[in-house]
């Protein structure tokens, strides 16, 4: 990025690697310098908790507020009823109003850790059901639908990729981008919102909203996207052998959350420090460049900083203490039994978790390993292991995983080339 911004917000976005694309960088920079800008990111209520994949954009909202601007967290109480088809191969399951409301209640817990909603100039928490549920179909088609070209909508990559694979795209889903565009128009009318942010997979939806708002309201508005994150080994950020990394403590304990960051691949440490902590950029670069055993202490700093933001300093300290107790004391540190697997061991899709448990010495037979799992005595990276059919492949072993039988028997599983 060669552009040198004047505004603090864009400077942070560029320096820390948050910026993928912007509809008009110069004009947005001027707007940010002229006075507080109101910006939003939308979150459909598809689960009871947000997950690590959402955390990058939550940090963008946090930096927006820290640099003097006003963030809106928009809950998709209305759009969730339709479901975003972007880059999906099939239609999302439709949720009823009760499920959507329950999910929103769970999701809202996280934002209060990162944003201040305390005063009249603070962040706003809104729900697009407030206006979408009131729309009258014929009036909406006449007033809003006439601004959308079907030809143009079909050209967006999120839709085009689905049709190119000859996978069905329902009329319900096709309306999603119109409703999201209408959100931007409505937020601009009601709250003077002039910036929509999101992941780069939302580019088409964001551009639609900008175009609609300019044409209907005659207002100059902007879009800014963040990169879609993958880890150094190519996996989608936030996926682990045990499933999604949830942000709500009742769905993933602070200790398991801490462990996820402690297990970051060496090559990702510097980048993740810039994204997910508020440490100075120079310090992030210094820590990310450490080698050998020193990089492990950088991972602890990363885990502590990220966990402190979400769950508080006490939870981060407790997680670190627990980890050191397990890995560094009582013969479970450097002396932890280690099973080394090669790529040849992982042919035909990988090795079953039952085989891994047996090979690691935590069980004498497959029958014993299955019983251990059935009786909730097995853990994977300190999370309960409940699926005896789980397959461990090379991606799952991008960084060593820890298996436990009961509270005192542990083994590390590593992939060797």
Image (cartoon, helix red, strand yellow):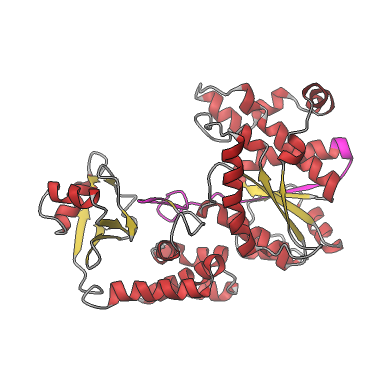
Quarter the N terminus occupies: bottom right
**199 lies above or below 320:** above
**180 lies above or below 150:** below
Who's the residue at 48% across and 70% down the image?
302
Main SS class of the magenta portion in the image: loop
As for residue 414 lying within the magenta part, the answer is no
Q: Is residue 109 left or right of residue 10?
A: left
| Total labels drawn | 0
**92 lies above or below 106:** above
Q: Quadrant of residue 187?
A: top right
Query: Residue 383 placed where, x, y %?
Result: 35, 57
Quarter the C terminus occupies: bottom left
Query: Residue 140 placed where, x, y %?
Result: 80, 27
Q: Is residue 101 left or right of residue 365?
A: right
Q: Quadrant of residue 148?
A: top right
Residue extending farthest to the left is 364
Q: Is residue 1 visible?
A: no
Who's the residue at 65% across and 28% down the image?
155
Who's the residue at 28% across and 77% down the image?
328
Query: Residue 325 placed where, x, y %?
Result: 31, 76
Q: Is residue 311 left or right of residue 22?
A: left
Q: Is residue 164 visible?
A: yes
Q: Is residue 67 left or right of residue 237?
A: right
As for residue 242 lying within the magenta part, the answer is yes
Q: Quadrant of residue 260?
A: bottom left
Start and end of the magenta stretch? 215-243
Query: Residue 131 placed where, x, y %?
Result: 77, 38
Residue extending farthest to the right is 218
């Amino acid at each position: 990025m060669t552009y040198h911004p004047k505004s603090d917000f864009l400077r942070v976005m560029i320096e820390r690697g948050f910026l993928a694309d912007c509809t008009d960088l110069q004009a947005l920079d001027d707007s940010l310098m002229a006075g507080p800008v109101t910006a939003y990111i939308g979150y459909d209520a598809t689960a009871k908790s947000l997950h690590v994949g959402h955390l990058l954009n939550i940090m963008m909202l946090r930096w927006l507020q820290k640099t003097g601007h006003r963030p809106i967290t928009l809950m998709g109480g209305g759009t969730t009823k339709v479901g975003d088809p972007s880059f999906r191969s099939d239609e999302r399951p439709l949720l009823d109003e009760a499920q959507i409301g329950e999910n929103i209640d769970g999701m809202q817990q996280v934002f209060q850790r990162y944003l201040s909603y305390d005063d009249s100039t603070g962040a706003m928490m809104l729900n697009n059901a407030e206006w979408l549920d009131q729309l009258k179909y014929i009036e909406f088609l006449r007033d809003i639908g006439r601004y959308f070209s079907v030809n143009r909508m079909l050209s967006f990559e999120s839709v085009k990729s689905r049709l190119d694979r000859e996978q069905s795209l329902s009329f319900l889903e096709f309306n999603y981008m119109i409703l999201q565009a209408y959100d931007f128009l409505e937020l601009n009318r009601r709250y003077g919102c002039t910036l929509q942010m999101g992941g780069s997979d939302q580019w088409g939806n964001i551009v639609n909203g900008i175009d609609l708002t300019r044409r209907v309201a005659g207002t100059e508005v902007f879009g800014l996207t963040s990169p879609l994150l993958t880890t150094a080994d190519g996996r989608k950020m936030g996926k682990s052998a045990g499933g999604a990394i949830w942000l709500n403590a009742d769905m993933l304990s602070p200790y398991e959350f801490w462990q996820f960051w402690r297990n970051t691949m060496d090559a990702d440490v510097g980048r993740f420090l810039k994204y997910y902590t508020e440490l100075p950029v120079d310090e992030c670069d210094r820590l990310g460049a450490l080698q050998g055993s020193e990089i492990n202490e950088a991972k602890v700093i990363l885990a502590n900083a990220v966990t402190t933001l979400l769950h508080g300093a006490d939870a981060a300290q407790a997680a670190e203490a627990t980890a050191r107790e397990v890995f560094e004391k009582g013969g479970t540190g450097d002396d932890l039994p280690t099973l080394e697997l090669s790529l040849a061991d992982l042919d035909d899709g990988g090795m079953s978790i039952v085989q891994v448990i047996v090979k690691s010495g935590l069980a004498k037979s497959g029958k014993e390993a299955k019983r251990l799992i059935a009786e909730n005595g097995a853990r994977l990276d300190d999370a309960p292991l409940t699926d005896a059919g789980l397959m461990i492949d090379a991606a799952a072993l991008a960084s060593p995983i820890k298996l436990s039988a009961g509270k005192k028997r542990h083994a590390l599983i590593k992939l060797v080339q």
